[in-house]
């Protein structure tokens, strides 16, 4: 599996994708930092993650990160090599998932420089910041796993990206149409972490959804392998 992780991780930086993800996210984060921290004199680092520029950009960046993971393999014909390789499909899918998540983790590490700036001028809530980091990782894990699943069901990267963006936006606006659907909004669940609260139910939901999407991807690829 390490070979897959290494290959996928390297591909993010041999193409512009990795640089685009990190660069655009940090630009959005900087805008959020300016308005949330500098504009209001706040030391609430956690609010930057939940601000509109950050969330909105993330809705498009995660699909950019995941849309090529399996769709490109299928389109170029290299999927057959993957499916017939000694590696199990489970290791292949997990390798691609971990590689994509690694880009998010690297990006999150870059945000620590904003935290350092806030520490220079004030005293942020360190516990809340740590919980926000954890929530952000769980939040991104859910959308990465769905993005990879979307990429597995089509050979068109653009379609995979549109499916992922559509899913992100739909789950975002669910509560606006029906408050009873609030439990289906990952963004609302993430908000609880920015308040310094680790909700067990939300955590289980994030992890369960991630595992479910990964399993669905594995099952879908197993069926494609059996047909070939």
Image (cartoon, grey):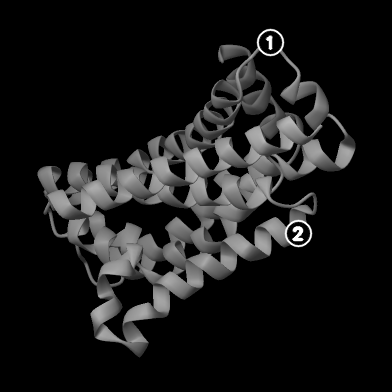
Tell me if 176 is positioned left or right of 98 in this view.
left
Q: Nearer the viewer, mark 1 or mark 2?
A: 1
Relative to 223, 81 lies left or right: right
Q: Nearer the viewer, residue 130 or 143?
A: 143
Q: Mark 2 or mark 1, which is nearer the start of the sequence? A: 1
How packed mark 1 is, by other alpha carbons closer than 10 Å (few <14, some 14-19, many 20 or more), is few
Residue furthest out toward the right: 76
In the image, 186 versus 222, the foreground residue is 222
> Which residue is farthest top?
86
Circle 2 packing at 10 Å, graded few (<14), some (14-19), many (20+), is some
* Image spot of residue 225 (x, y percent): 73, 31
In the picture, the disc for residue 149 is: none
Say which quarter of the image contains residue 71. top right
Q: Nearer the viewer, residue 92 or 2?
A: 92
Total labels: the figure holds: 2
Report x, y in % for residue 106: 46, 33
On the question of residue 116 being in view, the answer is yes
- Estimate the x, y position of residue 44 in percent, counting from the top left: 19, 58
Write down the residue under mark 1. Answer: 86
Name the secondary structure under disc 1: loop
Quarter in which the N terminus is drawn: top right
**Residue denoted by label 2:** 158
């Amino acid at each position: 599996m390490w070979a897959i992780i290494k290959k996928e991780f390297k591909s993010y930086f041999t193409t512009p994708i990795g640089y685009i993800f990190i660069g655009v996210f940090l630009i959005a984060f900087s805008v959020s930092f300016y308005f949330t921290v500098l504009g209001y004199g706040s030391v609430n680092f956690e609010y930057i993650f939940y601000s509109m520029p950050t969330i909105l950009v993330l809705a498009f960046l995660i699909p950019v990160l995941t849309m090529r993971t399996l769709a490109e393999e299928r389109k170029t014909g290299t999927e057959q090599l993957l499916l017939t390789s000694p590696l199990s499909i489970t290791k292949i899918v997990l390798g691609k998932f971990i590689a994509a998540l690694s880009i998010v983790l690297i990006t999150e590490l870059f945000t620590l420089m904003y935290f350092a700036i806030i520490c220079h001028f004030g005293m942020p809530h360190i516990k809340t910041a740590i919980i926000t980091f954890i929530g952000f990782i769980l939040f991104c894990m859910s959308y990465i796993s769905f993005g990879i699943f979307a990429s597995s069901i089509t050979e068109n990267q653009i379609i995979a990206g549109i499916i992922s963006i559509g899913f992100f936006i739909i789950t975002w606006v669910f509560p606006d149409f029906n408050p009873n659907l609030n439990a289906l909004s990952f963004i609302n669940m993430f908000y609880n972490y920015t308040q310094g609260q680790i909700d067990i139910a939300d955590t289980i939901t994030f992890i369960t959804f991630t595992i479910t999407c990964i399993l669905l991807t594995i099952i879908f690829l197993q069926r494609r392998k059996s047909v070939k």
